[in-house]
Amino acid sequence: MAQAIDLRSDTVTRPTPAMRKAMAQAEVGDDVYREDPTVNRLEDRAAEILGREAALFVPSGTMANQIAIRVLTDLGREVICEERSHILAYEMAMMAAFSGCLARPIRALDGVMTWTALAGEIRGRSIHHARTGLISLENTSNLTGGTVYPIHVSDDICDRAHEAHLPVHLDGARIFNAAVYLGRSAAEISQKFDSVMFCLSKGLGAPVGSVLTGSQEFIDEARIVRKMLGGGMRQAGVLAAAGLVALEEGPKRLHVDHENASFLGDALADMPGIRIAPAKVMTNIVVLDVTGTGLTAAEIAKRLAARDVLASAMSPAILRMVTHYDVDRAGCERAVVALKEAVGPAVRRTVH
């Protein structure tokens, strides 16, 4: 039986042989006491690569984002974010539950906000409404198809926000994908942000973990908040060892994932009932509008699963496919054939 082609997310990747070897041989210690040498190496290397003073290893990207919100802003403040951003759509209202903050969502074309769109939404001191405390950007933008912020746009937001005495956080879960697309380093495209999070367990392929980076003072506070959230790990070097391999080796092959995603976008663009703009497939995420098939995305996902292809229904109209190192070009070709088989009969009935 053929192995399933899993395009639900790049989080499904399995550790490489090099990661497994590193995990088995990792030097460990108690990280809460700052005595795990492998965690310390990962944090030092992450800070170096991102051009930051310090970094903090955490179990998940969600925890990293929520730590940043807690440290950078205050109780009762608003956090401006794009309305489809991960911190709003997929983090369980944690900014309200943990930090006492209210999301102020803005819809932006392809998930990429501009200062022009943001400026009118910023609120100052008032006795009637919450004051803006933080701006959060996401690069790449997951739910809009892995779109990338042009550097001048994100730099402009940071510059103008700082003039207004507002910090800016970057949810850079897939920042290395953005860097590959732009042909610049992750440090260059994120240098003006007050804090930057990136995931080791997505396109980079590690089994667990994310890293939060910033100034030494910011990370010192973040370490306290991590402990509040139950993120104080012990012999975490076993996990950090895989993260180090992912950090050093993962970015080198992300262009392959981008090429495979572009292949999917091009191959599916002319499929009846499917709507996609291939030019908007910038990185490793392909978002398909399946309204024209007469089926919901969940129904199509079920039909694909019966053909050993896994995809994610993001809404009744939207099906998402994400490429990663566990799916090669042949797997993408299988996915295209499976989707044609899954929706073809339904489209013909809709047409007739």
Image (cartoon, rainbow, N blue to C red):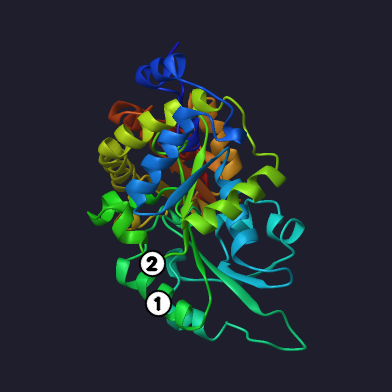
Of 228 and 103, nearer the camera is: 228
Residue at horizontal 47 percent and vertical 78 percent from the top: 161
Relative to 202, say whether 141 is above or below: below
The first of marks 1 and 2 along the sequence is 1
**Residue at figure coordinates x 58%, y 82% from the top left:** 122
Q: Position of residue 191 (x, y in %)?
A: 35, 62
Front one among 258 and 330: 258
Displayed quadrant of residue 324: top left
The secondary element bearing badge 2 is classed as loop
Q: Residues within 10 Å of mark 1 (few under 14, many from 20)?
A: some
- Is residue 274 visible to the viewer in this orientation of the structure? no
Left or right placement of residue 4 versus residue 84 in this view? left
Q: Is residue 246 visible?
A: yes
Residue hosting label 2: 192
Toward the left, the furthest residue is 183
Please tell me how crowded label 2 is: few (under 14), some (14-19), or many (20+) other residues with Cα within 10 Å: some
Q: Residue at x 51, y 31 (%)?
A: 304
Q: Are marks 1 and 2 in contact (CB under 8 Å)?
A: yes
x and y percentages locating residue 2 in the rendered image? 42, 15
Mark-to-mark CA distance, 1 and 2: 7 Å
Choose between 62 and 223: the one closer to the eye. 223
Residue type for callout 1: Asp
**Where is residue 275 shown, x and y percent of the image?**
42, 55
Residue situated furthest top in the rendering: 1
- Compared to residue 111, the image places residue 59 above or below, namely above
Residue 18: horizontal and vertical position, in percent? 35, 19
Residue that badge 1 annotates: 159
Q: Is residue 215 left or right of residue 260?
A: right
Q: Give the number of the disc on residue 57.
A: none
How many numbered badges does the structure rendering display?
A: 2
Residue type at mark 2 is: Lys
Residue 116 to residue 221: above or below = below
